[in-house]
Amino acid sequence: MERTLSIIKPDGVERKLVGEVVKRFEGAGIRIAAVKMVHLTKDQARLFYAVHRERPFFESLTEFMSSGPLVAMVLEGENVIQKNREIMGATNYKEAAPGTLRHDFATDIEKNVVHGSDAPQTANQEIAFFFNALEIS
């Protein structure tokens, strides 16, 4: 079984979309192996998104990701990284397919409701950022 990290971003939590996001994952046969709500500090957000440090959107992204609580989840299933990315839709919500989370709920490119790991190595690193082994069932 493959695992990945999914985050319901502060805009999704604020807009009360947590249940809808979880419903879509579970409806697609994805198992939620761990879940927690956290409020990142700006430094924690900078650490999590360090790979984007040189990008022009780094400051606004880390400001946004530390602006309110988020829900971090470990998703589990066969090909779950790809499945999660299909359910989320394109990062740019204007390019996301109808029926995807970002098409249906995003309001701009940063406030696009969800984050998901893009590869197995990234998933392992991102899961370890939010969860220890005892928190994942």
Image (tube, helix red, strand yellow):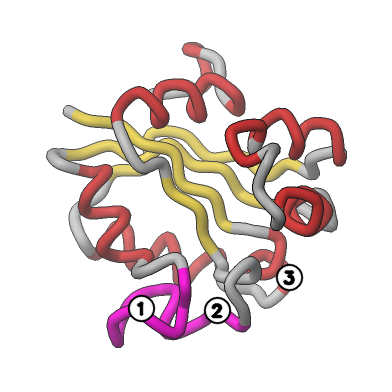
**Is 104 colored magenta in this rendering?**
yes
In terms of depth relative to the viewer, which is nearer, 119 or 10?
119
Please tell me which residue is depicted at 49% across the width and 27% down the height of the picture: 127
In terms of depth relative to the viewer, which is nearer, 135 or 1?
1
**Is 24 colored magenta in this rendering?**
no
Identify the magenta region.
92-107
Give the crowd class for mark 2: few <14, some 14-19, many >=20 residues within 10 Å.
Answer: many
* Residue at the spot of label 2: 106
Could you say whether the residue bearing mark 1 is in a helix, strand or loop? loop
Q: Earlier in the sequence, mark 2 or mark 1?
A: 1
Q: Position of residue 9 (x, y in %)?
A: 63, 58
Marker disc for residue 96: 1
Marker disc for residue 85: none
Q: Earlier in the sequence, mark 3 or mark 2?
A: 3
Q: Position of residue 118 (x, y in %)?
A: 35, 42
In the image: residue 61, left or right of residue 36? right
